[in-house]
Amino acid sequence: MAETSFWNGSEIYLCDLELAQAFHMARTLGMPLLIEGEPGTGKTELPLQYAKDKNLELFVFPVGSKSNVDQFVARFDHVKYLRDSQIEVLNAQREEKGLQNNLSTGGRSTELLDDYVILGPAAQAFNSPNSVLLIDEIDKAPREFPNDLLYALSHRKFIMPESGKIIEISEEQMPAIVITSNREQELPTAFKGRCIYHYIQFPEPETMNEIVLKHYPESDEEIVKVAIDIFYHLRRLGLERAPSTRELLNWLKYIQQFSKKEALERINNLSGIGALIKTQSDIEKVQRKLFNSSTDDYGRRSNFN
């Protein structure tokens, strides 16, 4: 039976109610969950933390611009098959000459085509009932990639290359499939129709404070408050690439190695800004804002008002 208990996060992952509901629905129906949202909102962490929390087997397929369905599902190793075919011919010739030490094919037989099928993350997940499968950043893939998945998502089966073997799984044993997208390109309507959809909104400051405390439960309350305050001011500046949750956590991890007094000074002076701001034009924009603004008792934190 599939693992369909209602999961709303773990000790280090905060899963809001709407996302938890969508994830539960997807697992109950045996459908993929498609999560969209800006980078750094925890899309990828959901399946990673779920698999870890539930002690489930995890398979990951990081999508790139050259990704194809063969890499994702399975491919036939023609080179190994040809080499083993040559070895079998050589061994037959050696036997004719009375030689007993045959060359090894590693236990493979060219009569068994499945021996040469290399399973990708999808086929491995379908061979592992109730596992977790992450298809990360599918919007980076060529247009045909999501279209090629329509049959498999609809019928819950893959056909292995060359051998024709079918890997099929029931709705009850379907892997928990999570597909993430940063919306760099629009996904096909038919593909979205095979998924449960959820868009992750960027968290409000109160929620962000909870997220930070999940990761750093021993953090000083004032340091976290001031850092989050500046973080959201930066996001309101209209930067080319606004800082994300992941970058705030990295920044705080660096800042917290100092004493409280020095940590607050470094936050107000934007020490380690490279953890938050990722383009030269954005750094220049922040610096201009600092230069043109005055300070108050909180130091440079007021410069963003």
Image (tube, rainbow, N blue to C red):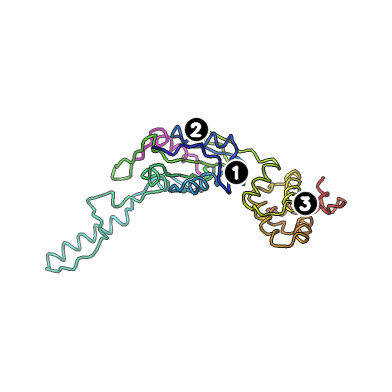
Amino acid type at image mark 3: Val
Mark 3 highlights which residue?
286
User: Which of 248/36 is in front?
Assistant: 248
On residue 25, the disc is: 2
* C-alpha gap between disc 3 and disc 1: 30 Å
Looking at the image, residue 84 lies above or below residue 161: below
User: Which of 167/215 is in front?
Assistant: 215
Could you tell me which secondary element the residue under label 3 belongs to? Answer: helix
211 relative position to 52: left or right: right
79 relative position to 61: left or right: left
Q: Residue furthest front?
A: 218
Could you tell me which secondary element the residue under label 2 belongs to? Answer: helix
Q: What main secondary structure does the magenta stretch of the protein show? A: helix
* Residue 143: in magenta span: yes
Q: Position of residue 291 (x, y in %)?
A: 84, 54
On residue 14, the disc is: 1
Crowd band around label 1 with a 10 angstrom C-alpha radius: few (<14), some (14–19), many (20+)? many
Amino acid type at image mark 2: Met
Mark in the foreground, 3 or 1: 1
* C-alpha gap between disc 2 and disc 3: 43 Å
Q: Quadrant of the N terminus?
A: top left
Crowd band around label 3 with a 10 angstrom C-alpha radius: few (<14), some (14–19), many (20+)? some
